[in-house]
Image (cartoon, helix red, strand yellow):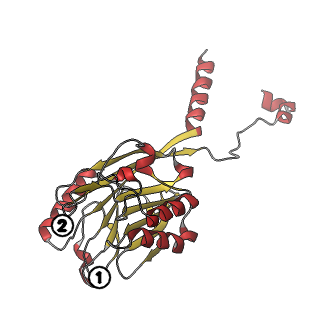
Amino acid sequence: MGRETKETEENRKTRHKMVVVGPHVSIITLNVNGLNSPIKRHRVAGWIKEQDPTICCLQETHLSPKDKHRLRVKGWRTILQANNEQKKAGVAILISDKVDFKAKQIKKDKEGQYIMIKGTLHQEDITLINIYAPNTGAPKFVKQLLIELKEDINNNTIIVGDLNTPLTPMDRTSRQKINKEIIELNEKLDQMDLIDIYRTLHPKTAGYTFFSSAHGTFSRIDHILGTKANINKYKRVEIISSIFSDHNAIKLEINYKKKAEKGAKMWRLNNTLLNKQWIIE
């Protein structure tokens, strides 16, 4: 009986090793509308600590290359930025000290409109693109950038940022039809197997990230895009209000499930050994 219990326990342990639930990762994106004020930087740092994301992506930091050291958050030591000399635009990616992240490649522009990092997060490949699209011609800008980065975009890619573009009529309180440029951007996303994660997980919810006082309308122009192949990994996505910016944030939670490696060999007794008397004994 004792031996049987021991074997059952061994089986249970082996079974448990077969599917190891990988780490939980959260990504948050927010247009901060400028970080040149020390008070604002302090409030943003406090907000990041409160939200505690694995990865935090910021747009419109308005930090020039010489001021980029001003963005510091305790617990998020790895900070990668694309900055503009004119203190316009500006994007940043902050990575939590709690995770095992290794950057392999970085691409960015001098205008501070986008930054792309390729690396590994808990030994899993990840490509992250943080975009701040200009106010005019945004859909065209995003489409062109996707074409330029086409070779870098794969199943492990997540694209976040202020795209300055509502992707569907539901993303605007005016319910205005989407124009030709947005239709072409959606076609490009579809061709590249990219999906709007919020709309995929909330097909009927009208959630907004921005209020335009000029037009008196709410819209969802901030997005997190992922790949169709990873749809089952996207556990939850939500809009989070922020009081220090004219935008709201979007937070995505991802579950990585690590399966046992293929071809993992199980130990088997070589039966010929039983021919040897001393082994039997």
Residue type at tag 2: Arg
| One can see residue 125 in this view | no
Mark 2 lies on residue: 41
| One can see residue 179 in this view | yes
Mark 1 lies on residue: 65
| Labels 2 & 1 near each other (Cβ < 8 A) | no
| Picture quadrant of residue 279 | top right
The C terminus, quarter of image: top right
Distance from Cα at disc 2 to Cα at disc 1: 16 Å
Residue type at tag 1: Pro
Which SS class for mark 1? Answer: helix
- Residue 99's place in the image compared with 38, above or below, is above
The N terminus, quarter of image: top right
The location of residue 69, given as percent across then percent down, is 25, 76
Compare marks 2 and 1 and give the one earlier in the sequence.
2
The location of residue 50, given as percent across then percent down, is 23, 51
Taking the spot 17% from the left edge, 55% from the top edge, the residue there is 243
Q: Is residue 221 left or right of residue 260?
A: left
Q: Is residue 101 left or right of residue 39?
A: right
Taking the spot 48% from the left edge, 61% from the top edge, the residue there is 183
The location of residue 191, given as percent across then percent down, is 58, 60
Out of 6 and 205, give the one closest to the viewer. 205
Taking the spot 28% from the left edge, 60% from the top edge, the residue there is 75
